Amino acid sequence: MPIEDPFKRSVAAKALLNFKICRKCGARNPMTATKCRRCRSTNLRLKKTKLVRK
């Protein structure tokens, strides 16, 4: 179900999209991470986001 309220949409986007993914093990890490919390690899990428337009 789509969220219409812009404030609630920004809160949901921050919770679901603003993190880094380890390319080695796939763990979710915070945006401020420089190393993976699980395997200590430094090979991190941002979570891929897709803009959905109506």
Image: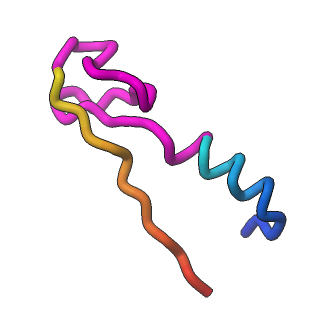
Q: Quadrant of residue 16?
A: top right
Q: Which residues are magenta?
A: 15-41
Judged by its main secondary structure, the magenta piece is loop
| Image spot of residue 44 (x, y percent) | 23, 33
**Residue found at the far right of this picture:** 5
Residue drawn 68% across the image and 49% down it: 12
Whether 38 is drawn above or below 7: the answer is above
Q: Quadrant of residue 24?
A: top left
Q: Is residue 39 above or below residue 4?
A: above
Farthest-out residue, bottom: 54
Q: Position of residue 39 (x, y in %)?
A: 22, 13
Residue found at x 61% / y 40%: 15
Query: Which residue is drawn at the image coordinates 17% and 23% (left, top)?
Result: 42
Q: Please state the total of marks drawn on the protein image.
A: 0
The C terminus lies in quadrant: bottom right
Decide if residue 51 is on the left or right side of residue 25: right
Determine if the magenta segment contains residue 6. Answer: no
Position of 51 with respect to 6 (left or right) is left
Front residue of 12/31: it is 31
Which colour assignment does the render follow?
A: rainbow
Q: Is residue 38 magenta-colored?
A: yes
The image shows residue 19, relative to residue 5, as above or below, that is above
Q: Residue at x 79, y 56 (%)?
A: 7
State which quadrant residue 1 falls in: bottom right
Residue 14 placement (x, y as % from top left) = 60, 44
